Structure formats: structure tokens, C-alpha cells
Image (cartoon, rainbow, N blue to C red):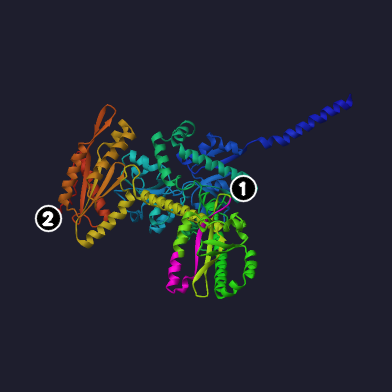
Amino acid sequence: MGRCCDNTVMRFLICFLLLLVLSPAYALEKVVLQLNWKHQFQFAGYYAAIEKGYFREAGFDVSLRELAEGIDPVDMVLKGEADYGIAASELALRRGRGQPVVALAAIIQHSPLVLLVNRRHVPNVDALNDKRIMLAPHESELYAYLKREGVEKFEAQPHSFDPADLIAGKVDAISGYSTDEPFLLREAHFPYRQFSPDSVGIDFYGDVLFTTEKKIKQSPAAVRAFRAAVLRGWRYAMANPEEIVDLIGERYSPRHSRAHLLFEASEMTRLMQPELVEIGHMSATRWQHIAQTYTELGMLPVNASLNGLLYHAEPDVLPPWVWPAFLAGASIILLAALMAAYFARLNQRLRREIATRLSTEAALRNSEERYRTLAEHSKDVIWTLDLASLRFTYVSPAIQRVRGFTAEEVMAEPLAEAMTPDSYAHVSQLLQEHLARLARGDRSALSATVEIDQPHKNGGTISSEVVASFLLDEAGQPVSILGIARDISERRTAEQQLRLVNDTLRQQLDEIQRLQAALQEQAIRDSLTGCFNRRYLDETLERELSRAQREGYPLSLLILDLDHFKQINDSYGHQAGDQALKELASMLTADIRHEDVLCRYGGEEFVILLPRMPLKVAEKRAERWRLMISQLRLPIGDIELGFTASVGLACYPDHGKTADELTQLADLALYIAKHEGRNRVVVYSPPEPPVRS
């Protein structure tokens, strides 16, 4: 009885210990991901990975932590208060200063970080000297941008993260994301301008997923699985933006409207370009360029090292098809080169053999037995042909290995049966040509090399290279042909495969060039209207002004703004507003000259650049466009929506000499048109000097 009780207790203890040991193996690992801002579409991929169970499938229970005021996400991860974090290109600064951060994946390929200003008070970036600027401490990219632009004296303000401070004039500039704050400024009809670091070559990464060296060394498999789940979530989010927008509003934050989140999703698609660049892709060269930029601006020492910054779990820097295609092509090219060298040596040997045979024809005719002994041990097919009957008089035993027929079978058939009809026609023509040349005394016609196709006994066809020489009688007349045939079917196949690989590589190169052209076009075009964008306008206006100054012709610039556009959006929805902008752009595109430049300046504002057009002509043209716009009708349901436009016009050299002056004066004229009642064209008129009494 006691022993039975002891056994029961022992079994209970063993089961209890097994539960203690095994239960953690099935538990999810709790992970904290430190965000670098509040909940919004900027972190859509992480929401998708949670909602779709990608983290759970990888073995993680993930908590997303919003950024608290005054907190740096990099410090939180380095201190161990978070396992992973979201940062930007300041990771290069941290690594260059010796801190053990490791970039796992670049989510946003081009940084959305910009400076936002009132365009009527700050015409260019130089005007920010001695101004009040709101910057977050970790926004090193903007500090580098200001330093490169020569803006070193400014009053740094604590960041309130509220665009209302810029609208109210409490500060002269604030930092923000091009995916976020511009939406609020447009809703407020605030005349903003954004300065981007990429205008001076500072094209940094945006949001980057990172962790520490310690985390990777402790759990390499977990880091790899976490990264894979994140990228899977981002691919789903960018393919289903509206679903994720609704998820954010329901479960994470009602801080932004649905329209705001959709705007953010659209801008992030432009910056990420997930259809062209694999999500998570990073380039060591680009990180080195980022560090070099910091070094040039004195923010990093000259010998700073980025070793260890990039995570190398899956070195798939190229699309998956490239390496197999490259290796296959290289193998085929190498094989072709080896075969070419081999056949070159064989051809050289054949030439030597032909030269030897030509010099010993008489000896061969007098010693047929010796000839047969040599021929029967050759791997190539050696044969003789009687010219009078065009029948083979001898065929070496190698013919059976090469074509499947015995020597006797081949000698019993006429010459035409030894090759395909096309090859026979070619050989017959070549034979007649060489006989004619020999008759004229051309001794170079004594031999020839030709490639032919021959039937195989199994019903197939082989390719052969034939080297043939005429045998002459005592009178010097050709009576027979001595030939050597070599099977080159494998060489033909290799050459065909090489051509196919070359064609494939050429098609891939054409596709790459097409994608590059598409990227260049996207960089200068507005995605909604197809008009040129503001970046293209800035470049073109400077160029056209220089040309106008050099050649002495006028240059008119007008700014056109749809009246009450916010009411259209509010009353009929953003789709109606977008359709109105498309209709307006289509009308203007059809009516402008070839040399005119139509740009979407932002929101409902369009800028038209009119080279070689005097002010009076430009004013008439602007008035005609205003009337055409007032006659446009946009069907919305059961109604037709009409709208009007206000136009501000300025001209070089009458009003301004620089791009900024011309733009500001046209904008001022537009302001006057709005102030005087809208639906009108106003030409800038400089103020009259005061009359001296």
C-alpha cells in the first residue's frame, strides 16, 4: 500500500515538472515595438501583422508603444525598454558614434521629413536665418539640411506637433511629414511651402525597423522571424490600404479622419513605391552616402565606421530571378567558350591534316591500305566520293556511331540520301562552283569546309561539319573527293541556347530601361492630373527665365485657383473634387501651346508658364481660360456642378527678374482677385510711389 502511494506521488511530480519545462515552449514571446509617433497609417504594416496573425504565427505577442513626449525611440531600444523600434537615418549617426544599433529593414525608401513654412512670409530657405523653427531633437536629417543650406543661426523651439502654431504665426517653420501635416494645412487653406532635404542631395531613408546587436546575438532566429512577419504585414497593408485605414479608426486612434488617413496612405505609396522597390530593401552604398553627408557637415568624425549597421539575414538584394539567370547565362557562355576553344583546336588540327593530305595525295593513292588503317581508327567519319557517279567509294566505320547506318548501307545509296534536301542543294551548288574555279586554274578551290544536316537511322537529324578536298589524277583533273565529317550537333545546340539566353537578357534590359523611364516620368508628374508637378516647375522656371534674359523675350506666369473648392469637397466628396481637377487639367492641356508649361502647384492651384508671350496677350489668354472654366459642367448624380476660377498674372521683365519674385507677385495678384470677389483675372500692378507735395 505504501509503495503504491509512493509511485503515485512520483508520477505526479514527474508530470508537474514536465509541464513546467514544456509549457514555455508553446507560449508566445512578448515583444515591445517602440513607434516614433502616434498611431496613424505610418505604422499600417504593424497593425496588419497583428490583425492578420502574422506575428502570432511567427511566435510573438507584440505590443505597439506610441512615442511619448520628449522620448527618443533609439534610446528606448538601447536601454532595453523596447525590443525593436522605428527610427530613420539617424541610425547612421548612432552607429557612427559607436552605439550598437542594427537596421533590419527600410520601410520608407525616401524620407517624408520636410520643413513647412508660410510661403508668403518665407519665400526661400535662406530666409529661415534668425527665424523660429520647431524641430524635434532626433530629426538630424533636417539639421543636416539646414546646415548645408547655410541656415546656422535660427531660434530652435520645442516642438508642439501642432500645425496650428504655424498657422497662427507663433513660429516661422515647423518640421513635419509630407504624408501628414500638409493635409491639415490644405484643409485650413493655409498658403504653405515645404522644403525637402532631397533638393540638396540629402535623400535619406524614412522609417527603418531596427534593434540591437545584443538582441540579434541572443535570438537570431527570433529576429529573422520578426522581420519576416513585419514585411509580410507591410505587403498586405499596401495592397489593402482602405481596410487598414478602417482598422486604425476602430482599434487604435480616432485622431485622424478617414480622408486624412487615406491621404497618408497615398503619399506613403509614392515614397515607398512597393511595386518597383521591394519593401525592406536597403543599400550599403546608400547608408555610406548618408554617413558621408553627416561627415561633410561635421556631425560625424571622418573615420566613423558603419560596420554592423546593416542586417544580413537574407541577402536578396536583387530580384530572385537575377542570380539563377545570371548563373545559367554564365554557365552557357563558359561552356560555349570551352567548346569554341575545343573546336578551334580541332579546326586547327584539321587544317594541318588537310595541308598534310594535300602534300601526300600521291602517296595516299598508291597506299590505300595504309589510308584505310588510319581512317578506321578515326572518331570522325572519313569518306571518298567518285565525282563521275556521285557515289561513295569508301566510308569509315565511325559512320555507324555517328549516324546509325553501316558503311555498306551508306555506300549503297546515292549522295542525295546522305543529307537533307536543303543541304544537298547547297552542296551541289558549292561543288559546281569549286569545279568551275579549278577549271579556271584557281588552286584555292581544291578544298572547302561546309556545315550540313544529315539523317540519322533513328529518324532524327544530326549536324555535321565537313572538310573536303579534291583528289586529282595525273593530268591534274579532279576525279574524286576525300572528306572528313564531324558531328557538331552538341555545338549547334549550345549556340542556340546561348542565343536564347542573350535574347532573354536583352528583353530584361529593355524592361529595366522601361521602368527607369517610368520612374523619371513619375518624378516630374502629378499623379492625379498628369500635369507637371511643383518640382518640375521650380527647375523649368529658372531655366526659362535665364533663356528669356539671354534672348530678350517676355515670360508670363499665371496662377489659377478654383473658387470655393473646399465647398466642392465638403458637399460632394473628394472624388468629385478630384474629378473637377482632372477636368480642369484636361481642358487647359488641350488649349495651351506646345512650349507652355502647365503645373499643378498644390491643392486646387495651377501655374501656367508662358514663354515668349507679352503681358497683354497673356491677359487675354487668361481671361479666355476663365470663361471656359465658368462654362465647364461636371455631372454629379442628378445635378451638374459648375465652378469658377480666379487668376493672378505677372510678367518678366515688367514685374520681376527672379523666379521667386515672379511667383510671389503672381500669387499676390491671385490674392487680390480672391479679395475682390473671385471669378476674375488680376494682373499684378506695382504700387505707385508717393506724390511729393
Residue 559 left/right relative to 61: left
Query: Closer to the observer: label 1 or label 2?
Result: 1
Q: Judging from the image, what secondary structure is the residue with disc 1 in?
A: helix
The residue depicted at 45 percent of the width and 54 percent of the height is: 506
| Mark 2 lies on residue | 692
Vertical relation: 245 (above or below) 392: above
Q: Amino acid at mark 1?
A: Lys
680 vs 283: above or below:
above
The type of residue carrying mark 2 is: Arg
Q: Is residue 363 left or right of residue 693?
A: right
Q: Classify residue 3 as left or right of residue 106.
A: right
Q: Residues within 10 Å of mark 2 (few under 14, many from 20)?
A: few
Is residue 331 in sight in this rendering? Answer: no
> What stretch of residues is rendered in magenta?
432-457
- Residue beneath the point at 23% across and 62% down: 550
Residue occupied by mark 1: 215
Residue farthest left in this picture: 693
Residue 97 is one of the magenta-drawn residues: no
Q: Residue 124 shows which numbered tag? A: none
The correct choice, above or below, for 159 with respect to 549 in the image is: above
- Residue visible at 26% across and 57% down? 544
Q: How many marks?
A: 2
Q: Determine which quarter of the picture holds residue 6.
A: top right
**Under tag 2, what secondary structure?**
loop
Specify whether residue 313 is in view: yes
* Magenta span contains residue 452: yes
Residue 593 location in percent, x, y?
Answer: 22, 49
In the image, 348 versus 573, the foreground residue is 348
State the CA–CA distance, disc 1 to disc 2.
Answer: 78 Å
